[in-house]
Image: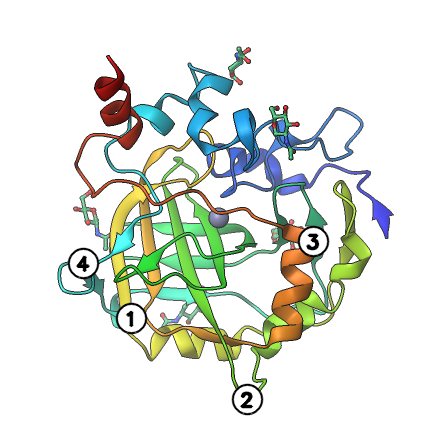
Amino acid sequence: MVRITNIAVFAASFSAASASCLSGTRLAARAADGTVAISTFNYTGEGGPLNWYGLNTTTNSACSKGKNQSPIDIVTQSIKYASASSLNFSVPAVPSAKFENLGTNVEVVINGSLVTSNFTYQLAQFHFHTPSEHRINEEYFPMEAHFVYETSAGNIAVVAFVFQLSQFGFSTPLFDSVFAHLDDIATPGTFTETGPLDFTGLIKHFNTHGIYYYSGSLTTPPCSENVAWYISTEPLPLNVQTYNAVKKVVKFNARYTQNTLGRDNLLEVSAAELQ
Ligand SMILES: *[C@@H]1O[C@H](CO)[C@@H](O)[C@H](O)[C@H]1NC(C)=O
Ligand SMILES: *[C@@H]1O[C@H](CO)[C@@H](O)[C@H](O)[C@H]1NC(C)=O
Ligand SMILES: *[C@@H]1O[C@H](CO)[C@@H](O)[C@H](O)[C@H]1NC(C)=O
Ligand SMILES: *[C@@H]1O[C@H](CO)[C@@H](O)[C@H](O)[C@H]1NC(C)=O
Ligand SMILES: *[C@@H]1O[C@H](CO)[C@@H](O)[C@H](O)[C@H]1NC(C)=O
Ligand SMILES: [Zn+2]
């Protein structure tokens, strides 16, 4: 276990994606001395999602007023699908990568790219939510991984995977290599190094199954919109031991399901009812 003592060099090139769950490498989350400052938002009481707007009514306006907020319940009959052949999800293998605990999340800082018909994005980090943030036909999942991308112009995309507990004890080797070092960073504000990470299997999984696509938002403050979501339709396997270990450190970090895309923000609906 090591205290974080240096600001990630490439954090400077990430702005919005860096300021949230979708966040991670954000400069804003790091104090001047380079130690991790625990997020001002969380998932409990007045720090939680019902009051994220109240934490900063200027920057977090979209959290209470946005009409295309994430996560959503994905209705498989009506959601759009992206074709894998129109996307290039690429993360080079690395001997190790920085793995850090930001208080509301644990994330791996690594390079990679995502090419879509619209943009070429650079990977900022990937991180985990327990339970899943998205639902699929109302079903939630024990865990969800988010690969957060941004272009130099600030366009954000997220590639997401949900996990399903395996009755046979199967798991996803890439994430086993990440979580093998989870105990090292049980304390918020600490970081360690993962073992070798090989993304070949994950990329193959992404390319050989369906992909839900929609335009939504960051699921943490500032809840910025116009985020392109690409969510694999096929859950990845997760074994019970890993699931229990992850939720013990990450704890509960899923935003509640937002309204149907395009409809009034649920907080505005609720506020109007109270008038
Ligand atoms: C959540 O954030 C609020 C507001 O900053 C704080 O008062 C509260 O102690 C935090 N709760 C937890 C469990 O972190
Ligand atoms: C809201 O966030 C902005 C930008 O980070 C900051 O300048 C401002 O001081 C914050 N306001 C409050 C009330 O925290
Ligand atoms: C996908 O992107 C990677 C990294 O830029 C590149 O090496 C690879 O050739 C690309 N694959 C395709 C099919 O374009
Ligand atoms: C990402 O790539 C850049 C440019 O090659 C390099 O400077 C940087 O150290 C890399 N970051 C990580 C986390 O590997
Ligand atoms: C590409 O951009 C257009 C216009 O912003 C948008 O309607 C479309 O959904 C985007 N497609 C993808 C696959 O991101
Ligand atoms: Zn996330």
Is residue 159 left or right of 184 when viewed as pictured? left
Read off the residue under disc 2.
Answer: 168
Q: CA distance from mark 3 to mark 4?
A: 33 Å
Contact (CB < 8 A) between labels 3 and 4? no
Q: Is mark 3 within 8 Å of ligand 1?
A: no
Q: Could you tell me the amino acid type at mark 1? A: Ala
Is residue 10 left or right of 15 when viewed as pictured? right
The crowding category of the residue bearing disc 3, from other C-alpha atoms within 10 Å (few below 14, some 14 to 19, many at least 20), is some
As drawn, the residue found furthest toward the front would be: 274
Q: CA distance from mark 2 to mark 4?
A: 31 Å
- Mark identifier at residue 103: none
The mark that comes first in sequence, 3 or 1, is 1
Read off the residue under disc 3.
Answer: 249
Q: Position of residue 65 (x, y in %)?
A: 29, 24
Q: CA distance from mark 3 to mark 1?
A: 33 Å
The mark that comes first in sequence, 1 or 4, is 4
Q: Secondary structure at mark 3?
A: helix
**Residue occupying the point 26% across, 17% down:** 274
